[in-house]
């Protein structure tokens, strides 16, 4: 219990010690209202100003030494601009001396200035806004030739460690050390402090450690720390700067730090791959190449003579059998592979990594699977897409298979020999086409009754003749038939296999096999092809006769209409004549009843 009480008291005692030291340090500093002439060898100033200030401080000694001026804390009016409110530092005894630099509201650093002689001037200007500005500044004279051991330097390599001067003993007063860390290109830096013990105050005004994202201390402040902690920082690039600054009192053991380089992950490949039966097309974005540090001039396929087309993208498009594309058969698939290599050429040395983009077209089962991935130091990234083989099936007018039948429906005579060819469109000369199964049906969806012409490579109809396999073509013939129950059409559907002719156990060369043996055979790809309908010529003649009758009826209909109109006109004229005759007769009777008489005089 006594030990626990002591452990609980330690942080309190440390805080009291900090508070006492800081109180004594604040008691020893001046709080000038507006400007002063200073000649002390070192001094800390706590400055509070309001609106419309224009105050100058002059620092000068007779000693032949240099002045280091540090603004470890500053607070301007938040709405002020650098033009209306700032601190200007001059390298000499007056504002007419050369300007060393400026501090304002948007300064992203802990400003440190160093004179070239024994005099220095700084001027603080504020605008008209009523707001209390706070500044903490301290300076000291020093001799540049007096170096502190283990204070700053350049650190290179993928990782390393460094400590404050005298660590773990107390660091010296008026210490100003700068470490520049630089690792390999395209990496980042992770900085970890295993131990840090500096003088503590609210704004880290007395002793502090500042970390910058870059090689300069003028901007890019990542963080500013003091007191007791174990902070961690990370840069945005392969360079980082660490600054240790201390004043004249209250020194502690300092820090111990370790840095490591972080290699960024590979950017997501902005690429696409399209595979067809005969071509491979690879598209790369220029932005993706830029992220790898390359452009289109650094690219080459297995065959360097195959060059890309460059627009706003870089496009390689080539036949599967060209540009030294390799082919490999695996189980029931064929894989076509080509590699785009990104590397510098024409140089004696390089510091860039060689990148390979591996593009694969995998032809398997009922689709074409495209795979593209990028390799860099055994790192692989994949993208995939899907396509299909280009296969068609057509009827031909003879066994020469030179003229395809283009009419649909295809009208034939009963028992006429029909010639069928399945064609594969591919630039790979080693592929073979094999017709495994062909089924006929009176319905296009093959949902009703079906009839097998070929099954598992075996002819099931007596009229079927299978022709020898010829590269990209599968051929057979059969005699035309019709289904019973007056079904007018016949549709044909075939299962087509595509094999590699170099394969030892190619299914395409085995011909008719049993189902059990066929299951163990290898083939690359399988698809279905449909052609039809087939109809008998007599059905067409019947249809043509019906069409002729329909056309004759259509032609006779206008003549009947004309006769009807003529007859109606004749009847109308007859009725008119009858009416006129009756009217005349009636008029004559009236005249005879009322005859004229002569008036006597």
Image (cartoon, rainbow, N blue to C red):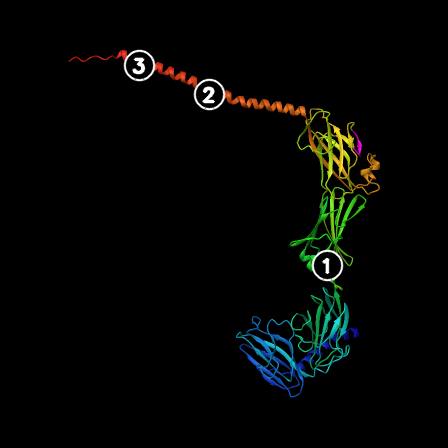
Check the image and report above or below for 496 versus 168. above
Q: Earlier in the sequence, mark 3 or mark 2?
A: 2
User: Which is more foreground, mark 1 or mark 2?
Assistant: 2
Q: Badges 1 and 3: C-beta atoms under 8 Å apart?
A: no
| Residue 270 x, y percent position in the rendering | 69, 54
User: Which is more foreground, mark 3 or mark 2?
Assistant: 2
Is residue 327 at least partly visible in the picture? yes
On the image, which quarter does residue 439 sit in? top right
Q: Badges 3 and 2: C-beta atoms under 8 Å apart?
A: no
Q: Which residues are magenta?
A: 455-460
Check the image and report above or below for 383 versus 101. above
Residue carrying label 3:
587
Residue 457 sits inside the magenta stretch: yes
Front-most of residues 219 and 116:
116
Check the image and report above or below for 145 versus 574. below
Residue carrying label 1:
266
Q: Earlier in the sequence, mark 1 or mark 3?
A: 1
The crowding category of the residue bearing disc 3, from other C-alpha atoms within 10 Å (few below 14, some 14 to 19, many at least 20), is few
Residue carrying label 2:
565
Tag 2 secondary structure: helix
Front-most of residues 404 and 206:
404
């Amino acid at each position: 219990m006594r030990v626990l009480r002591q452990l609980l008291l330690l942080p309190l005692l440390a805080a009291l010690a900090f508070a006492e030291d800081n109180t004594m340090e604040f008691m020893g500093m001046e709080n000038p209202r507006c400007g002063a002439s200073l000649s002390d060898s070192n001094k800390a100033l706590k400055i509070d100003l309001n609106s419309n200030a224009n105050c100058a401080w002059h620092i000068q000694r007779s000693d032949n030494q240099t002045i280091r001026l540090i603004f470890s804390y500053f607070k301007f009016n938040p709405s002020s601009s650098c033009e209306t409110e700032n601190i200007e530092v001059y390298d000499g005894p007056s504002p007419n001396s050369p300007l060393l630099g400026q501090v304002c509201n948007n300064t992203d650093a802990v400003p440190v200035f160093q004179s070239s002689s024994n005099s220095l001037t700084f001027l603080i200007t504020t605008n008209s806004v009523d707001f209390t500005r706070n500044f903490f500044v301290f300076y000291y004279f020093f001799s540049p030739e007096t170096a502190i051991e283990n204070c700053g330097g350049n650190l290179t390599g993928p990782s390393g460690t460094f400590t404050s001067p005298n660590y773990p003993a107390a660091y010296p007063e008026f210490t100003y050390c700068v470490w520049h860390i630089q690792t390999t290109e395209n990496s980042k830096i992770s900085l970890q402090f295993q131990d840090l013990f500096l003088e503590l105050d609210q704004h880290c005004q007395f002793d502090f450690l500042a970390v910058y994202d870059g090689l300069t201390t003028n901007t890019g402040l990542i963080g500013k720390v003091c007191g007791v902690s174990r902070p961690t920082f990370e840069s945005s690039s392969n360079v980082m700067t660490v600054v240790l600054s201390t004043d004249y009192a209250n020194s502690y053991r300092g820090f111990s730090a370790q840095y490591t380089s972080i290699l960024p992950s590979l950017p997501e490949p902005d690429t696409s791959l399209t595979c067809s039966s005969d071509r491979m097309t690879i598209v790369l974005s220029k932005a993706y190449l830029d992220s790898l540090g390359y452009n289109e001039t650094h690219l080459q396929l297995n065959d360097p003579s195959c060059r890309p087309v460059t627009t706003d993208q870089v496009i390689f498009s080539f036949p599967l059998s060209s540009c030294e594309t390799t082919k490999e058969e695996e189980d029931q698939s064929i894989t076509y592979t080509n590699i785009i290599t990104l590397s510098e050429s024409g140089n004696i040395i390089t510091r860039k990594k060689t990148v390979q983009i591996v593009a694969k077209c995998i032809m398997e089962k009922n689709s074409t699977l495209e795979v593209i991935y990028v390799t860099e130091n055994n790192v692989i990234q994949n993208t995939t897409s899907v396509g299909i083989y280009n296969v068609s099936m057509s009827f031909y007018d003879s066994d020469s298979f030179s003229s395809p039948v283009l009419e649909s429906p295809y009208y034939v005579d009963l028992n006429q020999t029909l010639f069928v060819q399945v064609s594969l469109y591919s630039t790979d000369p080693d592929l073979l086409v094999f017709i495994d199964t062909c089924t006929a049906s009176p319905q296009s969806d093959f949902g009703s009754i079906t009839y097998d012409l070929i099954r598992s490579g075996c002819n099931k109809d007596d009229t079927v003749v299978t022709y020898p396999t010829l590269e990209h073509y599968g051929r057979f013939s059969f005699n035309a038939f019709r289904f019973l129950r007056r079904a007018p059409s016949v549709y044909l559907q075939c299962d087509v296999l595509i094999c590699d002719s170099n394969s030892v156990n190619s299914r395409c060369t085995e011909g008719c096999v049993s189902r059990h043996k066929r299951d163990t055979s290898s083939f690359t790809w399988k698809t279905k092809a449909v052609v039809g309908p087939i109809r008998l010529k007599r059905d067409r003649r019947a249809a043509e006769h019906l069409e002729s009758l329909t056309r004759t009826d259509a032609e006779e209909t206008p003549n009947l209409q004309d006769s009807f109109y003529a007859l109606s006109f004749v009847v109308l004229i007859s009725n008119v004549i009858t009416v006129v005759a009756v009217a005349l007769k009636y008029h004559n009777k009236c005249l005879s009843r009322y005859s004229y008489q002569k008036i006597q005089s």
